[in-house]
Image (tube, grey):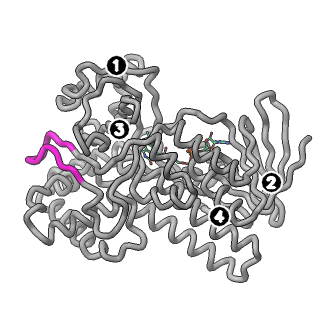
Amino acid sequence: MNQNHYDVLVIGGGPAGTTIATLLAEKGHHVGLLEKAHHPRFHIGESLLPMNLPILEKLGVLAQVDAIGIKKYAAEFNSEETALAQDTFYFAKATKNSPPFAYEVRRSEFDAILFNNCQQKGVVTQEGMTVTHTELNADLKTIHAQDATGRQHTFTARYLVDASGRDTVLAKQLKSKRSNPKHKMAAIFGHFNKVERRTGKDAGNISIYWFQHGWIWLIPLKDGTTSIGCVCWPSYLKTRQTDLNSFLQQTLAEVPAIRARMQAAQLQGEAQATGNYSYQSSLMSGDGFLLIGDAYAFVDPVFSSGVYLAMQSATRGAELVDKLLANAPNKETLLKQFEHAVSTEIKAFCWFIYRFNSPALHKLLMASDEAAQHPVKQKIKAAVISVLAGDAYHNTEIRLPLFIFKLLYGIHKIMAFKKNYAFNRFKQQQNNLN
Ligand SMILES: Cc1cc2nc3c(=O)[nH]c(=O)nc-3n(C[C@H](O)[C@H](O)[C@H](O)COP(=O)(O)OP(=O)(O)OC[C@H]3O[C@@H](n4cnc5c(N)ncnc54)[C@H](O)[C@@H]3O)c2cc1C
């Protein structure tokens, strides 16, 4: 048996885990991090948001990410159902000074940068170490893990942070994980070469396509590869009768605009699937422990918010844990403030995510030909872009325009009542499917 004691022990070496570990080590704490895989390892989630940049800068890795990433100046939306077939939301047009671009990255490279950085900043890391269970006593946490040879290891810590992503180690142990009743989608995805790109400054933009079974992403990566994924209704995925590779290609071929961009494309490696991925833990913290990033909640990748939310909750988490380790007297208030901030940011994306496939939101997002002319509509679009950039929490300027946007959404719903009612019924049926 190995015995290792830390001020803080972090489960998981993805964006959330490495961020909180680095920031706490920089504050002088003795931090350990256990990662079940070995970096570099594959991970989905390649499109970042502009508000990731200040965090990358704070961690001191911005130049390294710039070297492996491709700049993403905008998110482009495409629809075959609306009058406007394509609309591009440039981050430079956000209400405030959020950075005018983000990055598209290969996660194996991006996560390895974050992981190496946390080692350099003094975090004691162990790869190939899978946490199996924990004992959450009030003043001391005991963490049990297993290495690749099956050998058992025990660690202790004053504070425990679960950043184990979709494995949700603590939420499973505490039985606090709930599948999201409002959103039930699943994804199939793969990497392709020879996919046609946009030109010039638009070459790094993410392209999003609505289609009858859900929506599709195209994310260009620096080495010429394009990450492509289809986020579909469960009933459609149940119709699959072929292997996953053929099913992915068959699905993509249904959209003429994508077919045109993929004429010479070839799938690299195998397609992958992630079923029914939306969940949330009913608790975010407890006495001496915290759940951050996907270990707490994941909703949907449509606005590329996952990595940002993971790193942002980790940044807030580092401030919180630092104060708690110093025995701050107002512990309850600090925890409440942390939970409120994390939940508010997630909710800002949820409003759009839950309605993304609805005819009303579809129409509103693609109505911006007029927005180019009309000053009020321009302000509304700028507010929506701020949300898409990840700048929703401190940005008070967006409140009124977003309120008007939501009002317009309601009016659209009433005006096209039949269409929207049918959609809501369909969505409810999908949410009830097993
Ligand atoms: C289909 C799909 C597409 C997505 N696209 C995007 C996108 O374009 N942009 C975006 O921002 N987000 C996207 N996401 C979300 C994104 O992948 C996650 O939100 C993000 O990776 C969360 O970071 P994290 O650090 O919380 O978890 P992770 O990145 O999952 O890291 C968790 C780490 O913990 C380790 N671990 C797990 N269990 C254990 C254990 N028992 N012991 C030790 N270590 C363990 C894992 O190996 C992993 O390295 C997408 C998600 C899906 C499902």
Label at residue 30: none
Q: CA distance from mark 3 to mark 2?
A: 41 Å
**Separation (CA) of disc 1 from disc 3:** 15 Å
Residue 244 lies left or right of residue 172; in this view the side is left
Q: Position of residue 360 (x, y in %)?
A: 19, 55
| Kind of residue at disc 2 | Glu
Which dot, 1 or 2, sits closer to the camera?
A: 1
Q: Which residues are magenta?
A: 78-89
Which amino acid, mark 3? Ile
Q: Marks 3 and 4, Cα distance to the nearest angstrom?
A: 34 Å
Residue 123 percent across, percent down from the top left: 73, 52
Between discs 1 and 2, the one toward the N terminus: 2
Asked if residue 81 lies in the magenta stretch, the reply is yes
Q: Which residue is mark 3?
A: 219
Dot 3 or dot 2: first in sequence order is 2
Whole-percent x, y for residue 257 in the image: 18, 32
Residue labelled with disc 4: 285
